[in-house]
Amino acid sequence: MDTNEFVLQIKELSFGYKKSKLIYNNFSLNLKKSEVKSIVGASGSGKSTLFELITKSLKPLKGQITSSKIASIYQDPYSSFHPTYSILEQINDVVSNIDKDELNSLLEELSLDYDLILNRPHKLSGGQLQRCSILRALLMKPELLLVDEATSALDNIIALDVMKLVLKFLPNYGILLITHDMHLASWCSDEIIKLDTYE
C-alpha cells in the first residue's frame, strides 16, 4: 500500500516516563482517511500520552511518528478556549481567510447561530461549546482528527449526536479516538486498540 495514503503512521514506538517502565514498547499504527481507530483503556493506561506524542508535545524514546495536518477536539471544551476572547476571534487565530459560505454551512450543520460565536466561551453551554470545538477543527481542514474523550462530559443522547457530527465529515479525514467507552468505540470504529493500565 502506498504510504502516502496514510494520515498517521506510528512505527515501533517506545515511550515511558521512566525508561525502566515503558507505556509503549514497539507500538505501531497506521490510519488512512475515512478510517476511525479507537484507543481504549482505563485512566492511567497511556491514552492521552499517545496524543501528546503524536502532536510532538512529548518525544518518543524510540520509533517514528509521521502525520498529516492535525486538528484536535478535547474532553473539556471550556479548557479549549481562552475565556477573554470570542469564539470567532479564536477561530480566526488558527484559520486564515475563512470562507463565509463554508462557515455558514458548517454553522447550520452544527445547529449553531452566527451570533453565538461572537460570544465569549462562558456565555455558551457545554454542548454548544463542544460543537464550536468541532466547528474550529473542521475549519482547520485537517487530514487527521484527534478526538480525546470529547463526549465523556455529555449525556448519552448529546454524546451520540456529537459523534455523529464528527463522523459526518469523515471522508475528509481520518479519526483517532481516545475513549474509555467500549460501546462508543464498537459503534464507530474500524479498529479498536486496547491499552493495559501501566500505573
Image (cartoon, rainbow, N blue to C red):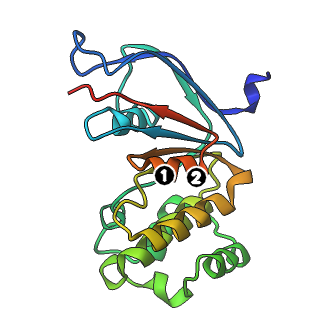
Determine whether 97 is above or below 60 in the image: below
Residue 40 sits in quarter? top left
Residue type, numbered disc 1? His
Label 1, on which residue?
Answer: 183
Determine whether 109 is above or below 139 in the image: below
Query: Quick one: SS at disc 1?
Result: helix
Q: Is residue 50 left or right of residue 91?
A: left
Residue 94 image offset from top left, x and y in percent: 51, 59
Q: Is residue 133 left or right of residue 30?
A: left
Closer to the camera in the image, 104 or 170? 170
Q: Are marks 1 and 2 in contact (CB under 8 Å)?
A: yes
Determine whether 79 is above or below 49 in the image: below
For the residue carrying disc 2, how many other residues have a C-alpha within 10 Å: few (<14), some (14-19), or many (20+)? few
Q: Which mark is residue 187?
A: 2
Determine whether 69 is above or below 8 in the image: below
- Quarter of the image with the C terminus in it: top left
